[in-house]
Amino acid sequence: MTVSGEARQRAEYLRGEIERHNHAYYVLDAPTLPDAEYDALFRALQSLESEFPELLTADSPTQRVGGRPLEGFAPVRHAVPMLSIHTETDTGPGGAWAFDARVRKALALPEQAPPIEYAVELKFDGLAIALRYEHGVLVRAATRGDGETGEDVTQNIRTVRRIPLRLINAAPAVLEVRGEVFMSRPDFERYNEQQRRAGKPALVNPRNGAAGSIRQLDPRMAAERPLSFFAYGIGEAQGWRLPATHGDVLAALAGFGLPVCEHRGLARGAGELVEFHDRILALRDALPFDIDGVVYKVNALALQQELGFVSREPRWAVAHKYPPQEALTTVEAIDVQVGRTGAITPVARLAPVFVGGATVTNATLHNEDEVRRKDVRIGDTVIVRRAGDVIPEVVGVLPERRPMRHQPDGASTPVAPAFVMPRTCPVCGSAIEKPEDEAIARCTGGLYCPAQRKQALLHFASRRAMDIEGLGEKLVDQLVDGGLVKTPADLYGLDLARLAGLERMGEKSARNLLAAIADSKTPTLARFIFALGIRNVGESTARDLARHFGNLDAVMAADAARLQQVPDVGPVVAASIVHFFAEAHNRQVIEALAEVGVRGTPSEPVAIDSAIAGKTFVLTGTLPSMTRDEAKALIEARGGKVAASVSKKTDFVVAGAEAGSKLDKARALGVAILDQAQLMELLEP
Ligand code: IVH
């Protein structure tokens, strides 16, 4: 079948459109078309090409998805060698001054000569690539190799969405674009998460991810790995009037539709180089990709020519590094730490290593699953990463450096055993609990565990619990750090002299606080249960428990089955309650509270109102003259319940201004809808 001119035109049109949208999406980050429409264009082109294979061109966007696996990569000789760049290892300002001084000396500039203009850019941490465009079409992509000869990785490079297969605007006859292929941090994290879920190996870092993908023999594998690209220079060019400066070269590349990083500029003299170095360092952790420094290039191409090369490195460019964010060290121990909410975190104790601008001796291993997945053991050599304010983490283990014990039969086993989570809290000795489907293990010590003490006290004193006014974070810190308070019961033994002696605490506020503490002694049983801080027991569950059991002893004596008779208490909540009271320490705290006269009093029998008792309300929107919390309190005082979401079981939806989807759902389900006035009417005794 011969291809009609019409089909040819249509394919041409579709390719142009798709590339235009690709450019807007991947390079400019400003999508011009909904995804579905883009997919439709793409599929139209695919089907046209499969009907008329003659129409298939090397630059067709359909070719990005990856072709057949290769036997190996063909060598590519670089017409213009791909040089490396001198690295200034002095990460302080000295690095910039030394480079500027070398350039001025090589150009034999007198001291009073004006400052040199430099193009300044980021040093991307990926893999150098040369892209050859002929008449605007990408015909070949090659790695750097030894600088003279690289490898033909065209198939894999075609899968990188940010690399245009065809340049836009009038393109030169030959243009070799040079730049860096890399994996962004978010793409790296997402890819690894996906691998983990599929039980497949994760990548060690984005750099290895990028290098590994480009050197994949199966381009379909490469296509699965999300890569990015930034252009930073050119090699061979024919049929193009070279701009006068490097800055203009980059601007021209951007004009051809190539991605050029926006964090670039011009600097005059060493002082401005230092400023750029500092500015980018401050930005480093917020960038979505890794950089290991910045690059300075003499801006005028004529001066670059004059400066030339020494031992395969241009005299006109330098990489000015930053302190590395990753380093190797060894694991001396694996401990667990208890957080303020009882979360247990395994932590690697490390041989001290300088990384990310600080000496690191500990790194988080996140949780038990993570330690097991990375299989970190004592004695292992590991990669640690510290980026900015983020807690240092163990990225991975170098398995080939693991200490092994060799058996006579030739087999070898690791010297250190695999990590196992302790069963009891290293701080307070209470049991550690980890629900099947959760990643985080927790200490059940609650009120008793010193690691959780401050958090537990703050919760105990909070407005919706014991409501002790004036007992805020700063005060709790002082009370706990000063050893005045260990458990909530100790609050009731505080005296004026001790309190008034605390920082920023006058006699008047001390008296007020003591009064508030004394006032809190007889909360409702519901508040008291809530104040205990049992995991998974919120205000509403605490109320249900109080109503159902009537006193604390009955709650403490109930087993999981009895607890589940309470409405809304399922197996998870029941287990948390049983665990809490099974812990002797928690029972001791409750006893100590009872000794000082603190106990929950069963709620006053609610005025049972048949219109409201047992009915479920959902509140939504802004009510004219009361907060949702106030409305909730009124409803509950009359025996009603307030739920968070609308379902078939909802009896009333109380809707205020700007009520959203809950109101829609109520209408859809035919649930009665009230405004504030109607609610008040219903609540009238
Ligand atoms: S220019 C003649 N600019 O650093 C100068 N290189 O040894 C050629 N790199 O692996 C390099 N960011 O891929 C230049 N903005 C940048 C760069 C950069 C990263 C890499 C390059 C090569 C190494 C240079």
Image (cartoon, grey):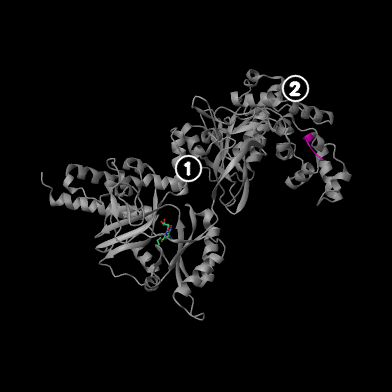
Q: Left or right: 242 with respect to 332?
A: left
Say which quarter of the image contains residue 423. top right
Residue matched to label 2:
553
User: Magenta part mainly helix, strand or loop?
Assistant: loop
**Above or below, comparing residue 264 to residue 624 in the picture:** below
Q: Is residue 226 visible?
A: no
Residue 143 placement (x, y as % from top left) = 35, 52
- The mark that comes first in sequence, 2 or 1, is 1
Quarter of the image that includes the N terminus: top left
Question: Three-letter amino acid code at disc 1?
Answer: Val
Q: Left or right: 280 with respect to 429?
A: left
* Region in magenta: 484-488
Quarter of the image that includes the C terminus: top right
Residue matched to label 1:
204
Say which quarter of the image contains residue 309. bottom left
Q: Secondary structure at mark 1?
A: loop
